[in-house]
Amino acid sequence: MSAQPVEPDRSTATYDELRDLADAFVDEADRLGNRVRADIDEQEIRVHMMSPSNPHGMIVLEVGFQIRTQDDGAVAAAEGRVHHPGLGLCRTADLLAATTEAYEKQDDDFAFFAPDVSVAVEVVSPSNPGNDYITKLRDYPRMGVPEYVIVDPRDGTVTVHSGPDTASGEPRYADTPRRYKFGDAVPMGRWTIDTAKFPRYRS
């Protein structure tokens, strides 16, 4: 859904107005019994239907559980929003991990300010892998998310990106991605996640 003006003399919607519209979409979908994500992308609201599989949900819960078990000062938010209002960008992550201090400094409950998050975790969907490997890999470093982890139950791999950098002109993760397989202990931000219990998708 585009928020560009229909009339030439009418201004575009502000980021705060788009936030309100995004919340309204989610609330109305909930009322109708549907689960959706409503992301904001430079004057557009992108609504995504959600139908997560059991392996997807199990991995998200397992990562959140391990983070909280290791660190009672951590916040692990499933289906957490992360945004950068100055860029007009808001994305919904499968899981966001942050410190309690980072959570408490947020202005409101709509979303985490991206640079305050410790790590964003996405579990790849069989139907739309490009959202994690292309769209979010492009947007998270632009927003200043310091570390991005892609968990892929299709092939049992975990890829960790870190170090947002602008040396190339376009913000991207500067380091060579660190790659792991299910069963490895994977550093994610200040935590280490045992992936031995991560399920694979069944073909």
Image: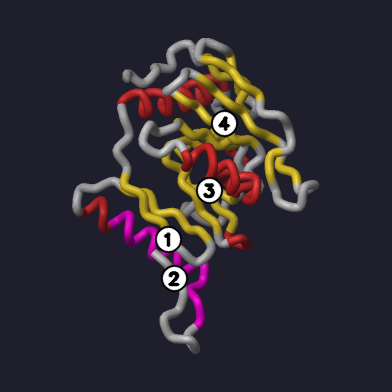
Q: Name the image quarter holding residue 136.
A: top right
Q: Quote the CA–CA distance across marks 2 and 1.
A: 7 Å
At mark 3, the secondary structure is strand
Q: As rendered, which of 99 and 132 lies closer to the eye?
A: 132
Q: Quote the CA–CA distance across marks 3 and 2.
A: 20 Å
Q: Which residues are magenta?
A: 11-27
Badge 3 is on which residue?
82
Would you call the spot at circle 4 few (<14 residues within 10 Å), some (14-19), or many (20 or more)?
many
Question: Mark 2 is on which residue type?
Answer: Ala
At mark 1, the secondary structure is strand
Residue 21 location, x and y as percent?
A: 38, 65
Q: Quote the CA–CA distance across marks 1 and 4.
A: 24 Å
Badge 4 is on which residue?
149
Q: Residue at x 55, y 37 (%)?
A: 120
Question: Mark 3 is on which residue type?
Answer: Val
Badge 2 is on which residue?
3
Residue 83 location, x and y as percent?
A: 55, 53
At mark 4, the secondary structure is strand
Instruction: Say whether marks 1 and 4 touch (CB < 8 Å).
Output: no
At mark 2, the secondary structure is loop
Q: Left of 171 or right of it: where is 1?
A: left
Would you call the spot at circle 3 few (<14 residues within 10 Å), some (14-19), or many (20 or more)?
many
Q: Residue at x 57, y 31 (%)?
A: 149
Badge 1 is on which residue?
45
Whether the magenta-drawn stretch holds residue 31 is answered as no
Q: Quote the CA–CA distance across marks 3 and 1.
A: 14 Å
Q: Nearer the viewer, mark 3 or mark 2?
A: 2
